[in-house]
């Protein structure tokens, strides 16, 4: 196991009816900006719960944060936050709203163009306080300090993180997820699954606790994921999926171990190029990437196959079967795993590679846990995704 430091300051408030605790989590008289997406929170009862619980605060609203939050939209929220002298941002929604809000809380306190944080590595020296009410379990953004942001004019989708961006608290009420479109439920399961494998399916580091935690998250998603699609208002299933998604990317399973993230880096480019959902791109890339790097990931793939899928046989056989089981699992959720399923042909592959090169240090020449996936390898993996 590698040396590591771990600290997570986010307070989790979990369970039904816990939105009411906003009354005690945010001080009386605080100027709060509530950020959210397309307005579904106004039809599922979450908005009214939040506003009732914030009756002791001075509230301003900002809506319209996209499923892939954009710089352009978040800049409007930053302008509003500065104008209104906002002291606290409450993000109500899924990972996209929370990610966008992390950019917003840093931007409100920044004198220059907040894109400097991403493009010029400008230091985030202060930020407005952040809290979240999670309505879509998937990204883990409710308990980490990172965000992904897209910029329309340049076609970029990039991520950064900073300790000042940790939410002070996150309220996780599984009942808020009941009304989610089934497509978002499917994508959320895939996202949490692959957040876990990015930190697990690498090479052994004798980190038994991290491995077992990862395997428990994956096993829970495999067991409860298909069930929830037929039982959308089953509280226990929703609760397990919500907590799985949070645990998948709150930093705990990634300490002291090698991490990959190549699937995410390639997936971000597919979203930018073709507009696919984040979860869809991950389901497309992961099986092919695992096949392509099978020899280097063999020990962990075999361990994964035996512990999660109860497979037996040689390491090579178990590895092959575990990759097949992974693809079958995504397909069973209704998330297709080939580019052709989305009508995508390889004409843009060269453009994707060139775009990655244009991102500079965000996409180093070699990616993956061993830093040996080249641009040519990425193109080969994309060809396998067809």
Image: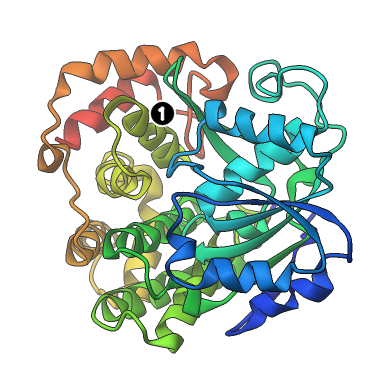
How far across and down, in percent of the image, does residue 321 sit? 20, 62
Please identify the quadrant where the C terminus is shown.
top left
> In the image, is 291 to the left or to the right of 204?
left
How far across and down, in percent of the image, does residue 150 sit? 49, 29
Residue 53 to residue 85: above or below: below
How far across and down, in percent of the image, does residue 54 sit? 74, 67
> In the image, is 141 to the left or to the right of 169?
left
Residue 116 to residue 132: above or below: above
Q: How is the image coloured?
A: rainbow
| Residues packed near mark 1 inside 10 Å, few (<14), some (14 to 19) or many (20 plus) | some
Residue 193 to residue 77: above or below: below
Q: Secondary structure at mark 1?
A: loop
Please identify the quadrant where the N terminus is shown.
bottom right
Q: Which residue shows up at 36% across the image and 28% down it? A: 272
Residue 227 to residue 177: above or below: below
Q: Which residue shows up at 42% across the image and 67% down it? A: 43
How far across and down, in percent of the image, does residue 136 sit? 47, 63
Q: Does any portion of residue 41 appear in the rendered image?
A: yes
Residue 77 sits in quarter: top right
Q: Which one is nearer the viewer's eye here, 101 or 384?
A: 101
Q: Which residue shows up at 44% across the image and 34% down it? A: 265
- Disc 1 designates what residue? 373
């Amino acid at each position: 196991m590698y040396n590591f430091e771990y600290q997570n300051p986010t307070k989790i408030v979990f369970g039904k009816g816990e939105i009411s605790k906003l009354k005690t989590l945010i001080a009386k008289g605080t100027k709060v900006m509530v950020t959210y997406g397309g307005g579904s929170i106004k039809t599922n009862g979450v908005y009214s719960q939040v506003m009732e619980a914030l009756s002791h605060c001075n509230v301003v609203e900002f809506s319209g944060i996209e499923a892939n939050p954009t710089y352009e939209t978040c800049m409007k929220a930053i302008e509003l936050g500065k104008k209104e002298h906002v002291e606290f941002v409450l993000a109500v929604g899924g990972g996209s709203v929370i990610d966008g809000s992390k950019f917003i809380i840093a931007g409100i306190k920044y004198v220059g163009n907040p894109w400097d944080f991403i493009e010029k590595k400008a230091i985030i020296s202060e930020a407005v306080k952040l809290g979240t009410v999670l309505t879509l379990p998937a990204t883990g953004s409710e308990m980490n300090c990172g965000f992904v942001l897209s910029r329309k004019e340049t076609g970029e989708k990039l991520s950064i993180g900073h300790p000042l961006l940790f939410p002070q608290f996150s309220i996780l009420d599984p009942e808020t997820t009941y009304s989610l479109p089934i497509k978002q439920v499917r994508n959320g399961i895939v996202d949490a699954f692959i957040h876990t494998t990015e930190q697990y399916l690498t090479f052994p580091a004798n980190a038994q606790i991290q491995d077992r935690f990862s395997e428990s998250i994956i096993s829970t998603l495999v067991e409860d994921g298909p069930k929830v699609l037929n039982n959308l208002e089953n509280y226990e299933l929703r609760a397990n999926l919500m907590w799985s998604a949070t645990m998948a990317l709150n930093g705990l399973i990634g300490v002291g171990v090698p991490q990959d993230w190549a699937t995410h880096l390639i997936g971000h480019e597919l979203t930018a190029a073709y507009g696919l959902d984040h979860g869809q791109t991950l389901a497309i890339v992961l099986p092919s990437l695992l096949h392509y790097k099978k020899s280097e990931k063999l020990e962990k793939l075999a361990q994964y196959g035996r512990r999660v899928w109860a497979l037996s046989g040689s390491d090579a056989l178990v590895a092959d079967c575990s990759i097949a089981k992974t693809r079958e699992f995504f397909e069973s959720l209704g998330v297709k795993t080939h580019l052709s399923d989305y009508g995508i042909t390889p004409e843009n592959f060269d453009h994707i590679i060139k775009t990655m090169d244009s991102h500079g240090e965000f996409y180093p020449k070699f990616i993956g846990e061993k830093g040996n996936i080249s641009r040519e390898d990425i193109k080969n993996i994309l060809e396998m995704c067809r």
